Amino acid sequence: MKNKSLELFVVILASVWCTIGGNMMEEDVVFYQEKGTFLKDHVISTHHVTTPIDCSFLCTSVEKCESYNYKPRGPGEQDLCQLNNATRQTKPLAIVSDAAFNHYTPKLTYYDCLAYLKDGFSENGVFTITDDKGNLFPAYCDFTSEPRSAWTLIMSHAFKMSHMPEFCTKELSMNVPLQENNPNWERYRLPLSQMYHLSNVSSHVRISTGFSKFGIDFTDYMRAQISDINILKFTGNAVCKTIEYINVRENIGEGVTAPFWQSNNQTSIFHVNTFKNPCDFDATSGAAPNERNFGMYCANKNETSREFRGTADPDSTTEYWFGGYV
């Protein structure tokens, strides 16, 4: 998904000043040009200039300017310079095609949602992530649900979509992306390479249910350190793994082990079975026969519970995230 139209255009020297070690230092700004596009609905001021360099200087001198749109006029006319208070990284859905414009954005690299949080972003939404190979991809970021943390959505599906192989039999070690350029709650799964990238830059994995409706209230929810359970590599049946927190039907465990399943032969995706109790965590009280939680709802609908948020009704959702803390 790397945008091959991104081209280095101009380096602006001595245009931004920052404090380093108590001294005022000059910081160079590199702007990239994206031909035939502009960022809509985020223009904070419009100017007439003669070159893109003039527009670059204007942008670096205005505190709220984060990128700019540039429209060449032709011989004898001044060009149009529109300063924006957003970038394609922060508002990727605002980028539109227009052959008359070029969009310029500073070189900003965010490898996960936590990097955006550390840079001051606080509103949940779709952001542009750069992977370890320099490829760009859109991802949904949650900055608000848990204090001092940020989470990147890697997979989500509605209960009514649980029959699809991507959410049923295709284990997480397989590359079976679904709507990877359109983060959504109903049916979405990132490519394996992007999952691995996010796993490598994250400390934690969590699985939530009904996020778009309830946010995170820690009901029917689990969270673990990736070092304790790597969901992209794990295989086994009823393997006890340490988790930081788990809640299933108000049965709660903290710092306990819970039983996990995931095949390596395309028969079952990552999940918990709470009807069985081989580990510390015990949610057998009130469990449906052979009840599966946090995934693998497809095997038998009688093996799910309406008391669990992820399987309460056809539109119930289950979300997988990688994230970390500030």
Image (tube, grey):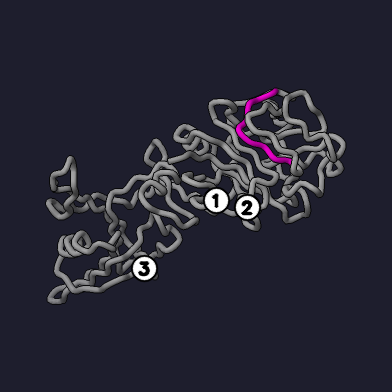
Q: Residue at x 40, y 48 (%)?
A: 116
Q: Main secondary structure of the magenta part?
A: strand
Q: Can you say whether 243 is above or below 217 in the image? A: above
Residue 174 in sight: no
Secondary structure, mark 2, is helix
Q: Position of residue 203 (x, y in %)?
A: 49, 33
Say whether residue 74 is left or right of residue 187.
left
Please provide percent x and percent y for residue 25: 14, 46
Residues shaded magenta? 240-248
- Taking the image as shown, residue 204 lies to the left or right of residue 31, namely right
Quadrant holding the C terminus? top left
Of callouts 2 and 1, the N-terminal one: 1
* Residue 272 image point, x, y percent: 72, 34
Vertical relation: 183 (above or below) 193: below
- Residue at image mark 1: 145
Instruction: Assess whether mark 1 and mark 2 are in contact (beta carbons under 8 angstroms).
Output: yes
Between marks 2 and 1, how big is the CA–CA gap? 9 Å
User: Residue at label 2?
Assistant: 211
Type of the residue with mark 2: Phe
Q: Which mark is residue 61?
A: none
Kindly identify the amino acid type of the residue bearing the numbered disc 1.
Answer: Ser
Q: Is 302 left or right of 224, judged from the image as shown?
A: right
- The residue carrying mark 3 is 42
Numbered disc 3: secondary structure: loop
Residue at the spot x=42%, y=50% of the render?
Answer: 128
